[in-house]
Amino acid sequence: MGMNIERVAELVAPVADRMGLHVYDIDQPGPTLRVLLDREGGVDIDTLAEATRDISEALDDADPIAGSYTLEVSSPGLERPLRRAEHFTAAIGEHVKVKLFPGAEGPRRADGTLTAAEGSTVTVETDDGPRTLEIADITKAHTVFEWATTPKKGKASKSAKATKKSPVPDTTTEPTTESSEDIR
């Protein structure tokens, strides 16, 4: 199954431009043609559905892919794949996870903050210090979305439980036993 990425990109770009989107990436893992579209503020599901219809029509008309395939159009998501130099440049300052091909220098994995992307290399600040990696040595990389942790509703943290005081009945006043007849 052959694919000409440049030809597919030529067909997808006008559709994306017309919709105010940019093509983040095009990839063909196995029988799936994956087109990732993005824009400032993200892409909603209705826009992706319209883009899928229009891209499918453009690809059907031009037929740039030999054989059958499944078209998948989506956004890059919160944890974006990093495959090209411009992906890494756009992710500077973000937490990333990187996996290297066997035989690359040093450990096969790097996890930390992406601090630089210059030419054919990227630098990741790990717990062990900075690591400069060749993009050509990277088999897989993506940003890591860090979810904010908030306590569950109705549940206090251990420290809050420790300082929380239990209600104590007020015993400073004497109970009264007046009846409604005594008050008259």
Image: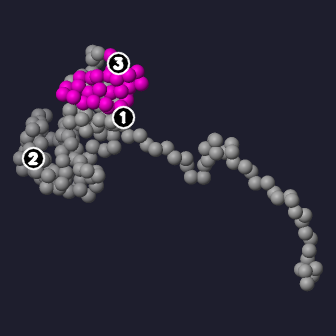
> Looking at the image, is 15 positioned above or below residue 83?
below
Asked if marks 1 and 2 touch (Cβ < 8 Å), the reply is: no
- Is residue 108 a member of the stretch shown in magenta? yes
Q: Position of residue 89 (x, y in %)?
A: 24, 35
Q: Nearer the viewer, mark 1 or mark 2?
A: 1
> Looking at the image, is 118 positioned above or below residue 78?
above
Residue type, numbered disc 2:
Leu
Label 2 neighbour load within 10 Å: few <14, some 14-19, many 20+: some
Q: Earlier along the polypeptide chain: callout 1 or callout 3?
A: 1
Q: CA distance from mark 3 to mark 2?
A: 40 Å
Residue identified by numbered label 2: 11
Q: Position of residue 156 (x, y in %)?
A: 61, 47
Badge 3 element: loop
Q: CA distance from mark 1 to mark 3?
A: 18 Å
Please state which of residues 172 and 137 is positioned toward the viewer in this rendering.
Answer: 172
Residue type, numbered disc 3:
Pro
* Magenta stretch in the rendered image: 106-135
Q: Position of residue 150 (x, y in %)?
A: 51, 46
Q: Earlier along the polypeptide chain: callout 1 or callout 2?
A: 2
Characterize the magenta stretch by its predominant secondary structure: strand
> Looking at the image, is 39 positioned above or below residue 68?
below
Residue identified by numbered label 3: 107
- The N terminus is located in which quarter? top left
Badge 2 element: helix
Q: Residue furthest right?
A: 182
- Is residue 98 a member of the stretch shown in magenta? no
Q: Is residue 29 visible?
A: no
Q: CA distance from mark 1 to mark 2?
A: 33 Å
Residue identified by numbered label 1: 95
Instruction: Find residue 71 and report its image quarter.
Output: top left
Q: Is residue 172 visible?
A: yes
